[in-house]
Structure formats: C-alpha cells, structure tokens
Image (cartoon, helix red, strand yellow):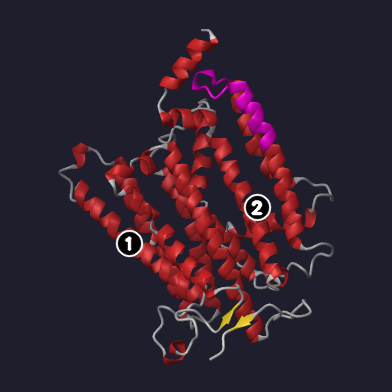
Amino acid sequence: MDQQQAVEQVVELPVDVLFSAYFPLPYRAVSTFIIGVWAWAITLQYLTKLHIDVESLLRFNQQRSGPPLYRSVYEVAAILTIVYTISATLFWMASNGSAYFAFLGLDILALSCFVAVPAIFFYPGIAFHRSGRYRFLRTMRRIMFGGLDRDTRFADILVADALTSYTKVIGDMWIMACMVLSHKSVASMPDRTCGGKYVVPTIIAIPYLIRLRQCLTDYLRSGARDTTHLLNAIKYTTTFPVIILSAVQRSYSESDDGSFLGALTLYNLWVLCMVVNSLYSFYWDVTKDWDLTMFKISSKNANLPHKGLRSILYFPSPYIYYAAVFVDFILRFTWSLKVSPHLYFFNHQEGGVFALEMMELLRRWIWLFLRVETEWIRTTGSGRLPVAMSEAGTGLHEAKD
C-alpha cells in the first residue's frame, strides 16, 4: 500500500476513529492530569498574589523551606509536559495519525508515557521536590481508604474532591488496563465494553464513596451533632442512583421491554436523579463551599453591598463571583447535552467524551479558587490558623455598609 492509498483510506475513516488515532486514550488520560497540575500551580500563584496563604491552609509550610509552593508545582508540571510532548511527538511521527498503522511499538510508546507520570512521583531521589511528591502520594494512599487526617483535613478534602472530577478519566484508565490484558491495541479506538458493562460504573463510584466516608467521619467526630457533614454525605449519595441508572440503560435491550421498568421509565428516572444531584450539588457549591448568600433569606444578607455575596471578598470584582456561580451552574448541567438528539457527539463519540471531561476540569478549577478563599476567611476569622504572612489582610476587599 503506497502512501497516497493510505491517506485516502484514513480520510474515509469516521471522525471518531480518526480522533482516537491522533489522540489515543493513554495520551488523553495523561493530558488531563498534566492540565490539572498546571491549573493547581496557577491557582496557588494567584491566591498568593491575593495574600491568601494556601501553604498554611494545607499545613505545608511547616514541612518545607525555600521558594513558594507554586514554583515547585510549576516545575513538576513543566517536567511532565516535556515528557508528554516528547512521547506524543514520537507517537505522531511513527503513526502518521493513521488507525491502520497501530502496532505493538505504538502501544508501548503510548503506555510508556502513561507510566512515566506516576514514575516521576515515585522517583526516590531527594531532588525534584521529593517531600512534596511523597506527601501527595501519602495523601492519595490515605484518602483511597476514606481517611481524613485531623491536621491536614482541608488538603485531604481538596484531593478527594478533585478525584470526583476525574471519574471519567479513572474509568478510561480501567478500559486501558482491560484492553492491555485482552491483547487489544490502546493506540486505536477504545473498546468501552471491555470487562463488562458494570465494572466501569463501579470504578466511577469509588471517588464518591471516598468523599461519602470522609463526610461520615467528620459527622462522627463532631459527636453526631454537626448535621452539615451529614447533609454533605447525602449530596454524594445522590450520585449513586445516577451511576446505577446510567449502567442499566446502557445494558438495556429490546428483550427487556416486558420488565417492570421500561426504557422510557428508566430514562425519566435517570433525568430526575440527574436534576436532583445537579441542583443539590450546585446549591452546596454556592452556599456551603463558597459561603455566598444568594440562596439564604436573612435580614443581614439584605444589607450586603453586593447582593447574594458576602461581607468579605478577596477577588478584585464582585462580578467574578457572579460569573463563577453562572459558569458552575452551566457546567453542573453538562449532562443535559446527552438529552438532545442533536448533540449526539457529546454522548457517543470519543471527542465528545473528552470535551465533557475538560468541562468538568474547568468547573473544578473555578470551584477551587473560591473554595480556598472561603476556607482562608473561615480559618483566619476563627483564629485557628497562625498567619504566616506579614499582612494576611493586605489586598482584602471588605464590603462596608
């Protein structure tokens, strides 16, 4: 087959297959992680500029000395990006973006990039910020079993919440492992039925189970008196009916039409559960995680100069908060893209799945800025945190009546 014939065949391939040929599953999974590291570095730098001492909140400055934490994160992100770029470039040069040229060497190249990311974090040398890398690994090990350290509670919660935004990526990782064990090429179109129809939904549920257990741990530590933790646990519980109904719908066949729950009933239940989960989660983001008052009815809230916000604002404009609320609401309902038959792309094609993953990472990034700011206000206001910065309030915008 000469080059012209190969190109003609590639052009005739479906867009979905071409997307996987140019951007196979291992590179997609790694790219989302690297983007997350860059996003965290940017968050740290900008919050530091606002005189929010994130290192004190994470109880990290007690274990290190030297440059700011965000510089270390930038360096890690840069190394990961270099490794990724070299591997992806070699892959594209070797494959020429053709699904017909998938062979063992391409699989090894794609998987080596995927394995290189955890290998960098497990690197035993003292160079390259070992204390930070190992602390992250210890945190991951702890939260995987639902652990919640008393001293680093906030850091544990942030990491666990981040995992809930990576559920689709975690599912992709299982599919990769299953394809490798089944001797299928991971450098081509993913086999999303690999391993059965219920394994991936079960794996996707794990991050929510982690957060559920953390909430229950907080509730028990409060002597079963702080119902806020219990209500937060209920929020994560509303995710499980969505996961179960999604799995049942995918395995539904015409032979099941005579069963107790028909296809239409399953679909309507799924939509109902998605609406409940999305509205509950959105309300929690705004009211509990960000301490904004737009959903609270109180005479004190009526006197705020910026309606629906709070008295203390660190970000330079109130419109940033309104925009964050609007974007959070929209991105909480990205699942609704699957409802429209005109948006088939977002539900059944690999490019659409990746786009949804990126939307969720964007939502989590926006959420993170305001969540850390809120925790800083709560902690310094309660006097629980020894402020390490000379002027923690510098740059603070406090609304006045």
Q: Nearer the viewer, mark 2 or mark 1?
A: 2
| Residue 275: image location, x then y, percent | 32, 61
Q: Tell me if label 2 and label 1 are in contact, CB under 8 Å.
A: no
Relative side of 145 to 389, left or right: left
Q: Residue at x 60, y 80 (%)?
A: 378
User: Few, some or many C-alpha atoms within 10 Å of disc 2 (few <14, some 14-19, many ≥20)?
Assistant: many
Element class at badge 1 = helix
| Residue kind at label 1, given as amino acid type | Val
Vertical placement of residue 31 versus 68, above or below = above
Prevailing secondary structure of the magenta residues: helix
Q: What residue is pinned by disc 1?
A: 275
| Residue 246: image location, x then y, percent | 34, 49
Q: What residue is pinned by disc 2?
A: 38
Relative side of 253 to 221, left or right: left
Q: Residue at x 66, y 27 (%)?
A: 90
User: Few, some or many C-alpha atoms within 10 Å of disc 1 (few <14, some 14-19, many ≥20)?
Assistant: some
